[in-house]
Image: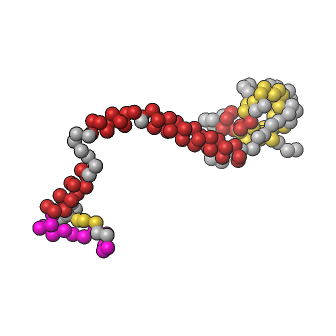
Amino acid sequence: MYMGELYRKSWDGPLLTCVSIEDIPRVLAEIDEGWRIGFEEGKNDQQLKEYLNFVDELRDEALYKTLKYKELMARTYNRRVKNRQFCIGDLVLQLCSASQPKEQSKLSPKWEGPYRVKKVIRPSTYELEVLDGKVVPRTWHTSKLCRYYV
């Protein structure tokens, strides 16, 4: 119903056609009959019980699809990511938003430093020091560091 008039989708003409007042009961009966196709009152409980037998299989299938999707996303991400590793003594810049998150503004510099890698904690985690030898607190991840070229 649209603005008090019943419209019907037609297959060969325009997208919507107006239905005359005499045709409204017939069109409503067709719509109602279309909703009821495939539904039988007596078989409904039996069909629900049969469906419950397949719930575990549907859950397993959904889990399988989820794992495949995660694997695909990981493969796509890992294809584009660059593995950055630094050695002891390398000069690096540190991301400003990581060290001073509240003091960051639009025109402030994005990187600060240079710092020297003092110690490799893990392949992607480093301990830094200022060039005069003073140790920088915290450890720093590769994603927050950038190589400094002199």
Based on the displayed image, in which of its 4 quarters is residue 139 positioned?
top right
**Horizontal side of residue 105 vs 27, given as left or right:** right
**Horizontal side of residue 138 vs 61, given as left or right:** right
Rendered location of residue 109, percent (x, y): 70, 44
* Residue 71: in magenta span: no
> Which of the pair 145/72 is nearer the observer?
72
> Which of the pair 111/38 is nearer the observer?
38
**Horizontal side of residue 20 vs 139, given as left or right:** left
Please report the bounds of the magenta region as a residue range.
12-24
Give the mark count. Answer: 0
**Horizontal side of residue 112 vs 49, given as left or right:** right
Q: Is residue 127 visible?
A: no
User: Which residue shows up at 45% across the image and 37% down it?
Assistant: 58
- Up the image or down, 119 lies above or below 142; here it is above
User: Which residue shows up at 19% across the image and 68% down it?
Assistant: 19
User: Which residue shows up at 39% across the image and 33% down it?
Assistant: 53
The colouring scheme, among rainbow, by chain, secondary structure or one colour, is secondary structure
Q: Quadrant of the N terminus?
A: bottom left
Rendered location of residue 18, percent (x, y): 21, 69
Rendered location of residue 64, percent (x, y): 55, 38
Based on the displayed image, in which of its 4 quarters is residue 17 positioned?
bottom left
User: Which residue shows up at 35% across the image and 36% down it?
Assistant: 50
- Up the image or down, 69 lies above or below 9; here it is above
- Up the image or down, 29 lies above or below 98; here it is below
Rendered location of residue 118, percent (x, y): 84, 28
Q: Quadrant of the C terminus?
A: top right
The residue at the far bottom in this view is 13
